[in-house]
Image: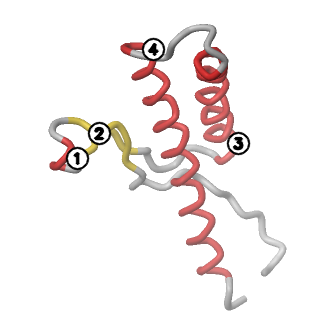
Amino acid sequence: MSNQHLTIKTKRGSQFVSCGDVTKKQNLFEVADGADLGDALIMASNFLDMVRDPVFNGAMGIEPLRDNPAFLVLHAIESAKAIIDSLVSAVEDLEAATSGE
């Protein structure tokens, strides 16, 4: 690989937040193209940080995780996963494009 500066950005296609009947297998949101790697990772980390306490409290029996808080946790985890999946896909594309150099 050359010494050129490589820029990794989010790649469109990672969908999240299912809606409707589960058999439809449809998602409402999709990661957008073009967010910088660092900014996208910070957002994924923020989503995961936001749900740490509710999940911990549920696991320890301090406060049950159900109803709206459970859905908030689910959507935050789905969002973080979609961001990470988008970046993994972008890195894989970059590796494939530069493997012959």
Against 6, residue 86 (above or below) is above
Query: Do labels 2 and 1 touch, CB within 8 Å?
Result: yes
Q: Nearer the viewer, mark 1 or mark 4?
A: 4
Q: Which mark is residue 18?
A: 2
User: Which residue type carries mark 4?
Assistant: Pro
Work out whether mark 1 precedes mark 3 in sequence or the reverse, and give the earlier one. Answer: 1
Provide the residue designation for mark 4: 69
Q: Nearer the viewer, mark 2 or mark 3?
A: 2
Provide the residue designation for mark 3: 38
User: Which residue type carries mark 2?
Assistant: Ser
Work out whether mark 1 precedes mark 4 in sequence or the reverse, and give the earlier one. Answer: 1
What residue is rendered at 38% in x and 13% in y?
68
- Indicate the secondary structure of the residue bearing disc 4: helix
Work out whether mark 2 precedes mark 1 in sequence or the reverse, and give the earlier one. Answer: 2
Provide the residue designation for mark 1: 26
* Label 4 crowd (10 A; few <14 / some 14-19 / many >=20): some
Q: Is residue 85 left or right of residue 46?
A: left
User: Which residue type carries mark 1?
Assistant: Gln
> Residue 72, percent across and down?
44, 20
